[in-house]
Amino acid sequence: MVDQTREKARGHELGHLRLDRYTAAYDWAVQCIDTGHYLEAIAVLDSLLGDRLASRYSYVRRTEPSVRPAVGQLCKVLLHGPPKVVNPPIEVDPQFRAVIGEIQGWAKTRNSAMHQTAKILRNGAARVGFKDILDEHRQTALDGIALLRQFDELDTLDRQRAGKRPGTWPNAFFPEKRPLRPRRDDLT
């Protein structure tokens, strides 16, 4: 089994690879929203949020999480400490706590989008077309974009105060602010 911990960048190469991947993934999520592929956008945003939350965990604790938990689990651990252990919360910054709480709520909406979209649970349920159900998930995707950007802004500021940079620097999730440079992880 391959070690699932996240290697810390010790130079520019891994940092550039991460930035390129984040940028490509974010751009793909936006493109999916623009073309009505909301579930795919939600899946990519879930991956990005999970990575950024795991990075925050690592940054605050100065250690990697033992496994790669899901977004909801990461939120729970950051807000309330590890399960079955009497520990204070890992995240103590009130701004981070607020956005992590919102991400936790988003994860519940994401679960509904990803796991309930194709199901009819009751006989006599309202006759709603599949496309109409998919369209309801547009807002979940847009909320994921907003939360990712909000989290990234906090993370970037916090790390700058410590003389560091997150893997998303500069502006992986803010195309309107990105410097012009070629990406190695291009989608074409």
Image: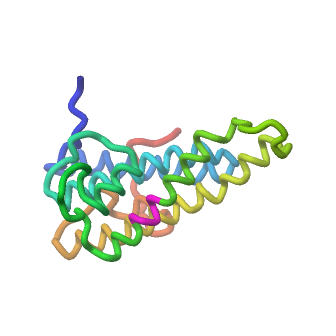
Q: Nearer the viewer, residue 6 or 118?
A: 118
Above/below status of 170 relative to 68: below
Above/below status of 116 relative to 151: above
Q: Residue at x 23, y 69 (%)?
A: 159
- Image side of residue 132 versus residue 172, left or right: right
Secondary structure mostly seen in magenta is helix
Residues shaded magenta: 100-104
Q: Give the farthest residue toward the top.
A: 1
Display coloring: rainbow
Q: Nearer the viewer, residue 8 or 141?
A: 141
Question: Which quarter of the image is occupied by the N terminus?
Answer: top left
Total numbered badges shown on the rendered structure: 0
Q: Residue at x 26, y 66 (%)?
A: 91
Q: Residue at x 50, y 68 (%)?
A: 176
Residue 59 location (% of width, % of height):
20, 59
Q: Nearer the viewer, residue 109 or 142?
A: 109
Residue 74 location (% of width, % of height):
33, 52
- Does 4 appear in magenta? no
Q: Residue at x 25, y 71 (%)?
A: 92
Q: Is residue 182 visible?
A: no
- Image side of residue 141 versus residue 17, left or right: right
Residue 2 location (% of width, % of height):
23, 27
Q: Nearer the viewer, residue 117 or 64?
A: 117
Above/below status of 128 relative to 87: above
Q: Is residue 126 visible?
A: yes
Residue 128 location (% of width, % of height):
83, 45
